[in-house]
Image: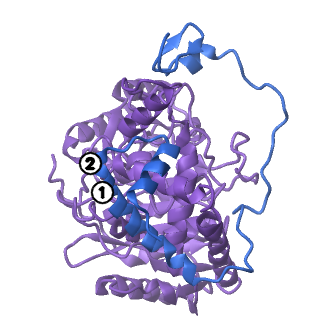
Chain colours: A blue, B purple
Amino acid sequence: MSLDKEKIKHVAKLARISVDEAKVNSLTKDLNSIFKFIEQLNELNTDKVEPLTSILNQSLRSRKDEISDGKIREKILKNSPKKNEEFFCSSKGG
Amino acid sequence: MSNITNQSLSEILESIKSKKISSLELTQAYIKNIENAKKLNAFVTTTFDQALENAKKFDNKPNNEQLLSGVPLAVKDLFCTENVKTTAGSNILNNFVPSYESTVTKNLWNNGAFLLGKLNCDEFAMGSSNETSFFGNVINPVGDHLVPGGSSGGSSSALAADLTPATIGTDTGGSIRQPASFTGTVGLKPTYGLCSRWGIVAFASSLDQAGPMTKTVNDCSIMLEAMSGFDEKDSTSINKKKETYSKNLKDNIKGLKIGIPKEYRVDNMPKEIDELWEKGKKILKDLGAQLIDISLPHTKYALPTYYIVAPAEASSNLARYDGVRYGYRSQKGKDLIEMYENTRSEGFGDEVKRRILIGTYVLSSGYYDAYYLKAQKVRQLIKKDFDDSFTKVDAILTPSTPSSAFKIGEKTNDPVSMYLNDIFTVPVNLAGLPALSLPAGLDKQGYPLGLQLIGKALDEQKILNIGYAFEKNCGYKNEIKKWWS
């Protein structure tokens, strides 16, 4: 299948990435060549194959539901582009 | 003493232990090299003051019982380092200063090493030439017009140029082994789960694995021993007893069975790569190993599978970059959604955006089965190919890459041709196996070429042993001229 410009703009919207109108054409060309390459997989019949869900021969470990750290608000806020006392600030206000 | 930085890590450790050189002198020698090598653009951040301080501390109270006593190390800028900027080669993390240390780097420091600086890499480790970094491309010390490979290109360049005695990288589809091959150095991608992923900027979580990049196989075993080990903080970390790879390093490979997969002879592969492979086979055979022809029938589907699985995982991992909690934020946008869109558009480079879009698409409603689920099924077949082969052989020998280092700019306009560079390295990541790239020869232009040894899961010791025997008998010498200083 081929991806058209509208589809790509829609996917970009889902991914929360704005795409310059000037770049849509080259992006469409690149993505289509990548998908053409990816679609080689359609040569294979995989009807009877189980999808691989973990590469390890073990299931994911879960830890005890206990607090192991805390009181690190300052550290967590330190890298925020915009903060107000003990809160992260989103785009407007603050 | 003037040549200390030419030496291998194990030789340097010996010199420190025997007090032939102090940690401070050693650190000063590397700092001098780094300052003279700015043209290579291998470093994003240097931590010289901190390193000198640590070196003095070591000299005042030397502890020589550790694996990496008194040694300064530069690491890929994908490992979070406490209070030292960590960028992942991206504008979106240009101002990010972690408040914690990655487990793998912490393991290095607990073994006596200390940080010298952070090394350039492809943005979020997405690339095979170090040309996607926000901080500019890195130059291969082999030649001023050549890429150092990627994504651990700053690591391979710095190591080959004697700017660090050893280093670590990460490998999602070949990002340790391909740059090692392009610079005539040793690179190991360990078994998935052997080294903790905690504190490493995530790209594709089911494929990412940290590993050593070194000048010799012995150095590689020392570094692996230091960095690996179970970590509670990584839910995919394997809980097993720690191995002493360097102590157990042996060069006797008599009777080992080495598989030669016919599918790794690809179309348009340069004759030199084929000849290199033949040379490698002969060396192992002369050492008493038995060569066995094997088949890994789904090899050709590994790259297409990878370019679904890796972008899919990347698109969800990179969803965290929202300009709110950390990292770059755009000043443009009339509401929250526009702020997200502009932040991500301005913060990510073209290759990262491409992969996020691919990943978002293959996971989106209506396309999931056709792409992502299909890829997970083919991944199963690729893993099964290896499982079947490892009932017959101890290790597999292949070329590391289909070419030597290419020119800067040569492949940037054609993403698929760039991706094809990882054709021999990607299957290993999909199957979670360990693989070692060894310098094995030069092509007619004098550029390094590597061979790859693939092992069973958790069989690092065996491929290190084979590599150790190979290295002693290969006669490879890295003769890089220091044109940059």
Q: Is residue B164 above or below residue B80?
A: below
The chain holding disc 1 is: A
| Crowd tier of the residue under label 1, counting other residues whose Cα lies within 10 Å: few below 14, some 14–19, many 20 or above | few
Image mark 2: chain: A
Q: Is residue A60 left or right of residue B41?
A: right
- Give left or right: position of B168 versus A59: left
Residue sitting nearer the eye, B4 or B30: B30
| Alpha carbons under labels 2 and 1: distance apart | 7 Å
**Quadrant (top left/top right/bottom left/bottom right) for the N terminus of chain B:** top left
Q: Which mark is residue A25?
A: 1
Q: Which residue sits at x=17%, y=56%?
A: B144
In-front residue for pair B58/A66: A66
The disc placed on residue B252 is none
Instruction: Please provide percent x and percent y for residue B298.
Output: 57, 82
In front of the other: B45 or A22: A22
Hey, which residue is sitting farthest front in the picture? A6
Question: How packed is label 2: few (under 14 Cα within 10 Å), some, or many (20 or more)?
Answer: few
Give the structural element (helix, strand or loop) at label 2: helix
| Residue at 35% over, 65% down | B418
Q: Position of residue B75 (x, y in %)?
A: 43, 43
The answer to whether residue A44 is seen in the rendering is yes
Kindly identify which numbered label has been placed on residue A22. Answer: 2
Quarter of the image for residue B291 reads: bottom right
Secondary structure type for disc 1: helix
Type of amino acid at the residue the image marks with label 1? Asn
Residue at image position (58%, 38%) is B199
> Which quarter of the figure has residue B102?
top right
B401 relative position to B380: left or right: left
Q: Residue B469 versus residue B149: which sits nearer the camera?
A: B149
